[in-house]
Amino acid sequence: MDRKTHRYTTKDGFTVEYSSVGQGEPVLIMHGGHSSCNEELGYRELLENGYAIITPSRPGYGNTSKELGEDVITACEAYVELLDNLRLPQIHIIAISAGGPSGIHFASRYPQRVKSLTLQSAVSHRWLTPEDKLYKSAQTMFRPSNEKYLWALMRLMNKLVPSLLFKSMIASFSQLQPEQVLPQISGEDRRQFKNMLNRQRSGHGFLIDLALTGHDLTSVLSAIQCPTLIMHSIHDATVSVEHARHAHRHIPNAELCELDSWGHLIWLGKGAPAMFHKLFTFLDSIK
């Protein structure tokens, strides 16, 4: 993948790191938590189907200014500036996992710039709040002073015992039992999962995500005008399928695709080909 990474400075002096790859219809990807502009899941398939991919590192991730995360509207304004700089009047948006609120706010606020919105395993409702145990533990584990040690340990385990690590993490992604999941995962899927873990860092970004995903998005969802596809595994243990159903209830004329795939990472496993077929049928219909 001949990806190029750039930095754009907004009129207010903030930095937006972003990557670009491919030729064709432009897709802006709002990556998930612990990720950045170096994300790869699903990219090969987008490129093979004739799409160009622009991926900004969201606020606090990579080299993007964490200050942009103080207000999601400020971040969206920075994305508009970036698109203007790239001379892209309209784009498709794919918003993934904790990147869901960013894509939802952008599509709602800038309808003239968005051809379509696809939500993949996306947060679209209140997710983790300060009352949740997971929220409290995440505040400690992914604090900027701690997260680099956590991910260093994960990378070490990923190198020494990758199969054991994958099996131990299944419960984080899937409601299915490991013996139900493992037959669905190929050697190539394991390679992609291993590479994903090696890329991950939290920076300041995940704590910004936690603050953002505690908000009620109902009114924002209701204002979305573009064609919208919502894709979510019914077995997702990271972000409940109820998020997808909530988005479907409130986005006018949205299409809901509930997947009988293994879990949160819908780009991997036996269910991935059917997911990609549905995605490209949707995107190609809007060209």
Image (cartoon, rainbow, N blue to C red):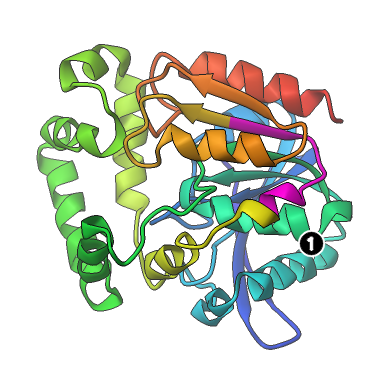
Q: Residue at x 62, y 26 (%)?
A: 256
Q: Residue at x 72, y 35 (%)?
A: 228
Instruction: Judge from the rendering whether residue 25 lies leftward or rightward of residue 48; answer left or right.
Output: right
Q: Is residue 216 above or below residue 253?
A: below
Q: Position of residue 283 (x, y in %)?
A: 75, 29
Give the residue number, with chain letter if any, for mark 1: 83
Instruction: Judge from the rendering whether residue 1 lies leftward or rightward of residue 146; answer left or right.
Output: right
- Residue 72 can be seen in this image: yes
Instruction: Judge from the rendering whether residue 227 lies leftward or rightward of residue 204; answer left or right.
Output: right
Magenta region, residue range: 220-230
Q: Residue at x 34, y 41 (%)?
A: 238
Magenta residue check for 119:
no
- Residue 55 can be seen in this image: no
The quadrant holding residue 8 is bottom right
Q: Position of residue 53 (x, y in %)?
A: 67, 45
Q: Could you say whether the residue bearing mark 1 is in a helix, strand or loop?
A: helix
The quadrant holding residue 83 is bottom right
Q: Residue at x 25, y 39 (%)?
A: 172
- Find the residue positioned furthest to the bottom: 12
Q: Position of residue 117 (x, y in %)?
A: 71, 41
- Report the quarter where the N terminus lies: top right
Bin the neighbour count of mark 1 within 10 Å (Cα to Cα): few under 14, some 14-19, many 20 and up: some
Q: Is residue 237 above or below residue 14?
A: above
- Report the quarter where the C terminus lies: top right
